[in-house]
């Protein structure tokens, strides 16, 4: 509303000042009502601004983010349970089926073979079914593999069941970090993906506890069969998980994608802004193998992801976890109970170190964490190898047994705070948008 001034020029009406101007011919009641209206509007702006900081919806958003990060990381729990369970069950399986060393290796490595098979179909499966239902498919296969392992009547049947378990792990190990990276905002992406690795370590610890409990009876079937319970839990949790907003946008379901983002972001503006970014990125057509052949930068990113995953395996930490009881037997722990307790201590170290990594991975930086972690692992494995060599030569003292445990803990801690979470984070971050699915599939298959 404009009113004339002394010089004939119009100016914006200001109810706070007009009552002091004798030449302004405005009714006093009108001035008063304008003042009340302006004051009420300013009050409402203040209320809205303050309520936007701590609304009930913000608490709901945080709860939803927590639920997604925990539920989608349960596949890591299944992976960790399988790693830990086979370490404790292998001695009893060996006695039951009278296995040679070669067959023992097949029992352990058959899961990795299945994981490689599962990784080959990850990209297609996650695109056709979506991240959510890919997780459910992996959970169903995990239930079938666990039951098959528990009721195996021959070593061949056991190996086949563990291949099915491996396929489930291969699907989950690709889909879960990908889903978490797409659901998380940029400032907490590292923390949410690290939750997957934390679940892996929790699964290992729970498996070692289960192994210790069943070691007195030697019931390896119960050790393997109990894995079906958390897989059923995952099936239930997946029902309540939302679809990935990126996958929804890929399918043209933009309204649903925005609804999911509204549940996960602090404000509607952030949700709309991120959806626009997703839609822009989807305009870059996925190139896959064709782009890999002609684009040097794409090849570099894909090979770097594969190299990172290979380096994670070459650390040997998975071998230590699989064969921990046997390592401690070589280190002078003679009884099964002693070996399982020492293995449990290592598992607890793994879990606590990963817990620390969850809260430091976004602050410490990716490269410094890898440099420090690999240095710690190198030192630990060298000293551990020296200790085991002394036992092999028959010149070791009892103190070297505990030094072996300490060095194993040191190796695992270095791994948990560096290569274990950081490699998965980097592999999801370094791939170009044009061939992201292809690059992640290649790196996961390498792992």
Image (cartoon, rainbow, N blue to C red):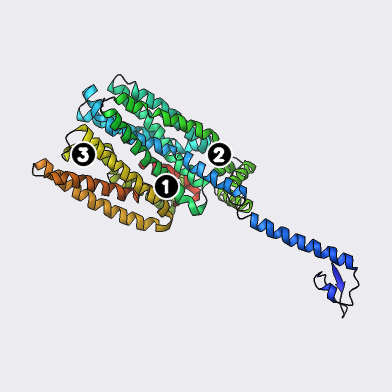
SS state under label 1: helix
Q: How many callouts does the rendering have? A: 3
Residue 223: quadrant of the picture:
top left
The numbered mark, 2 or 3, whose residue comes first in the sequence reads 2
Residue 58: numbered disc: none
Residue 263 shown left or right of residue 172 in the figure = right
| Residue indicated by mark 1 | 194
| Residue indicated by mark 2 | 243
SS state under label 3: helix
Above or below for 358 versus 325: below
SS state under label 2: loop
Q: Residue at x 57, y 42 (%)?
A: 250
Asked whether 153 or 126 is in front, the reply is 153
Q: Residue at x 28, y 20 (%)?
A: 154
Residue 319 visible: no
> Which quarter of the figure is the N terminus placed in?
bottom right
Asked whether 81 or 335 is in front, the reply is 335
Residue 304 shown left or right of residue 56 in the figure = left
Residue 281 shown left or right of residue 22 in the figure = left
**Mark closer to the observer (1, 2):** 1
| Residue indicated by mark 3 | 327
The numbered mark, 1 or 2, whose residue comes first in the sequence reads 1
The numbered mark, 3 or 1, whose residue comes first in the sequence reads 1
Residue 47: x and y, percent? 68, 57
CA gap, disc 1 and disc 2: 20 Å
> Which quarter of the figure is the C terminus placed in?
top left
């Amino acid at each position: 509303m404009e009113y004339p001034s002394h010089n004939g020029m119009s100016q914006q009406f200001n109810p706070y000042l007009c009552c002091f101007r004798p030449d302004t011919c405005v009714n006093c009641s009108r001035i008063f009502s304008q003042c009340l209206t302006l004051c009420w509007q300013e009050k409402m702006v203040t209320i809205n601004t303050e309520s936007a900081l701590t609304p009930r919806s913000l608490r709901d958003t945080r709860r939803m983010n927590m639920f997604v990060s925990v539920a989608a990381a349960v596949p890591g729990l299944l992976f960790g349970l399988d790693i830990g369970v086979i370490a404790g069950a292998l001695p009893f399986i060996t006695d039951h089926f009278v296995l040679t060393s070669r067959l023992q290796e097949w029992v352990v490595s058959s899961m990795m073979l299945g994981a490689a098979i599962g990784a080959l179909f990850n990209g297609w499966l996650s695109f056709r079914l979506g991240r959510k239902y890919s997780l459910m498919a992996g959970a169903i296969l995990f239930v079938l593999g666990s039951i098959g392992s528990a009721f195996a009547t021959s070593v061949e049947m056991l190996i086949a069941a563990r291949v099915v378990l491996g396929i489930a792990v291969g699907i989950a190990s690709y889909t879960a970090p990908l889903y978490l990276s797409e659901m998380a905002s940029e400032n907490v992406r590292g923390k949410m993906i690290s939750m997957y690795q934390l679940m892996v370590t929790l699964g290992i610890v729970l498996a070692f506890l289960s192994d210790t409990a069943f070691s007195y009876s030697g019931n390896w079937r119960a050790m393997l069969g109990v894995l079906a319970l958390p897989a059923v839990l995952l099936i239930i949790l997946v029902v309540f998980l939302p679809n990935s907003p990126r996958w929804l946008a890929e399918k043209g379901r933009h309204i649903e994608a925005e609804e999911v983002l509204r549940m996960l972001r602090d404000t509607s503006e952030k949700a709309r802004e991120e959806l626009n970014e997703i839609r822009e990125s989807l305009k870059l057509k996925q190139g896959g193998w064709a782009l890999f052949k002609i684009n040097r930068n794409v090849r570099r990113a894909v090979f770097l992801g594969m190299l990172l995953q290979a380096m994670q395996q070459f650390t040997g930490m998975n071998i230590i976890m699989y064969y921990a009881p046997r390592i401690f037997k070589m280190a002078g722990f003679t009884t099964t109970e002693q070996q399982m307790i020492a293995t449990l201590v290592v598992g607890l170290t793994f879990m606590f170190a990963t817990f620390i990594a969850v809260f430091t991975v976004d602050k410490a930086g990716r490269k410094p964490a890898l440099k420090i972690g690999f240095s710690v692992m190198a030192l630990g494995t060298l000293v551990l190898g020296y200790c085991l060599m002394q036992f092999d030569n028959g010149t070791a003292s009892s103190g070297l047994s505990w030094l072996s445990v300490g060095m194993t803990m040191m190796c695992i801690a270095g791994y948990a705070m560096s290569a274990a979470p950081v490699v998965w984070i980097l592999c999801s971050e370094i791939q170009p948008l044009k061939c992201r699915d292809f690059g992640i599939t290649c790196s996961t298959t390498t792992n």
